[in-house]
Amino acid sequence: MVDLSLSWAQDADSNLSLPQYKTGGAAGADLRANFPPDKRTTGATLVAGSRMLISTGLHIEIPLGYEVQIRPRSGLALNHGVTILNAPGTIDSDFRGIVGIILYNSSDQDFHIGHGDRVAQMVVATVQQAVFALEAILGETDRGQGGFGSTGKS
């Protein structure tokens, strides 16, 4: 278990729930749309084929050696074609801004986002930074330089 510290942004609705896991086995904690006061009753419309930055109203402090991945909610993707454009999005341990979600509507129908709607999920993951070394020759493998589709269909 990892402790993450959160704080509300200045205009955020602190009556909304913090990220929460809906079941004991859930890997992702739900994140909610947190609109400024003037948009709380109307929400926002994500026009078909467009993208929009949705605020969660939260700042987050992630311990060194961890990241938070922002991932789509499968129900929104399947039922409405709404997904995360840069999935998974990464929040680094040194970021202290407001967590935003880049929603994308891949459908041909506009999609309404209400204040407090669950719009994404966050997964906490460990991070290892690499030491990069330039080599003249890399080790051989069976696959070699075979790219997309090179391992076959079965």
Image (cartoon, grey):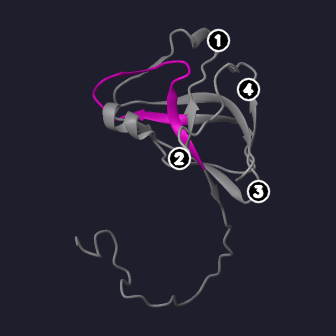
In the rendered structure, which disc, 4 or 2, sits on the residue that comes first in sequence? Answer: 4
The amino acid type, in three-letter code, at marker 2 is Ala
The residue labelled by disc 1 is 37
The residue labelled by disc 4 is 9
- Pinpoint residue 128: horizontal percent, then vertical percent: 67, 67
In the rendered structure, which disc, 3 or 2, sits on the residue that comes first in sequence? Answer: 2
The residue labelled by disc 2 is 26
Q: Secondary structure at mark 2?
A: loop
Cβ–Cβ below 8 Å for labels 1 and 4? Answer: no
Cβ–Cβ below 8 Å for labels 3 and 1? Answer: no
In the rendered structure, which disc, 4 or 3, sits on the residue that comes first in sequence? Answer: 4
Up-down relation of residue 39 to residue 1 (above or below): above
* Separation (CA) of disc 1 from disc 4: 12 Å
Position of residue 113 in the picture relative to residue 16 (left or right): left
Position of residue 111 in the picture relative to residue 9 (left or right): left
- Pinpoint residue 71: horizontal percent, then vertical percent: 50, 44
The amino acid type, in three-letter code, at marker 4 is Ala
